[in-house]
Image (cartoon, rainbow, N blue to C red):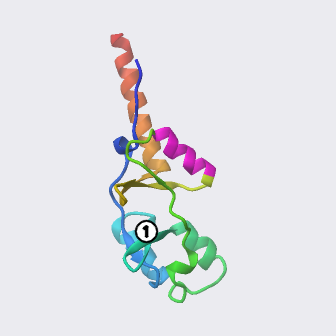
């Protein structure tokens, strides 16, 4: 038996954007309100980077800067690391490891349609492994 798990099978479509000129305080508020720990950063309506809670902690809070005084465009990570929805899940996971990041974004026809997070990927893979172990006694 061979299982072919694709990015589209595990991706999350919760993707939110914030303008690069907004403050890190606004970004954190948005993350908490939406229940996510990253936001795409936009310039003129187009995604140009990603800001995460870790970016804000490391680059703003830890250094003693004001959350209100630092724009997300100053602390974002760029470029955005992406995968296709038809890529194998292993590719998404490999990119996260290679780039020391916790999420990759899913792009289809030039548009970001979702994201894969380390936690989300782990949960989906664990669900599948548990299901397979339950089915194994049938074989």
- Residue denoted by label 1: 39
Residue 78, position as x, y percentages in the image: 55, 67
Residue 28, position as x, y percentages in the image: 45, 75
In the image, what residue occupies the spot 50% across and 49% down?
A: 118
As helix, strand or loop, the secondary structure at mark 1 comes to: strand
- Residue farthest along the front direction in this orientation: 109
Chief SS of the magenta region: helix
Q: Is residue 48 above or below residue 89?
A: below
Quadrant in the rendering for residue 133: top left
- Residue farthest along the bottom direction in this orientation: 69
Q: Specify the quadrant that holds the C terminus.
A: top left
Residue 129, position as x, y percentages in the image: 43, 29
In the image, what residue occupies the spot 40% across and 17% down?
A: 1
Q: Is residue 36 above or below residue 68?
A: above
Residue 98, position as x, y percentages in the image: 62, 49
| Circle count | 1
In the image, which residues are magenta? 89-98
Q: Is residue 14 left or right of residue 122?
A: left
Crowding near the residue tagged with mark 1, few <14, some 14–19, many ≥20 C-alpha atoms within 10 Å: many
Q: Is residue 84 left or right of residue 97?
A: left
Residue 109 is a magenta residue: no
In the image, what residue occupies the spot 61% across and 54% down?
A: 99
Quadrant in the rendering for residue 126: top left
In the image, what residue occupies the spot 43% across and 48% down?
A: 120
């Amino acid at each position: 038996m061979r299982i072919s798990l694709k990015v589209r099978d595990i991706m999350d479509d919760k993707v939110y954007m914030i303008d690069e000129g907004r403050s890190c305080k606004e970004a954190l508020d948005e993350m908490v309100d939406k229940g996510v720990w990253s936001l795409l950063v936009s310039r003129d309506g187009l995604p140009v980077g990603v800001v995460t809670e870790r970016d804000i902690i490391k680059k703003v809070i830890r250094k003693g800067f004001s959350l209100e005084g630092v724009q997300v465009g100053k602390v974002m990570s760029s470029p955005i690391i992406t995968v296709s929805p038809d890529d194998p899940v292993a590719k998404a996971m490999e990119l996260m490891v290679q780039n020391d990041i916790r999420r990759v974004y899913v792009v289809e026809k030039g548009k970001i349609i979702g994201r894969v997070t380390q936690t989300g990927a782990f949960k989906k893979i664990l669900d599948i492994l548990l299901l397979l172990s339950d089915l194994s006694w049938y074989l």
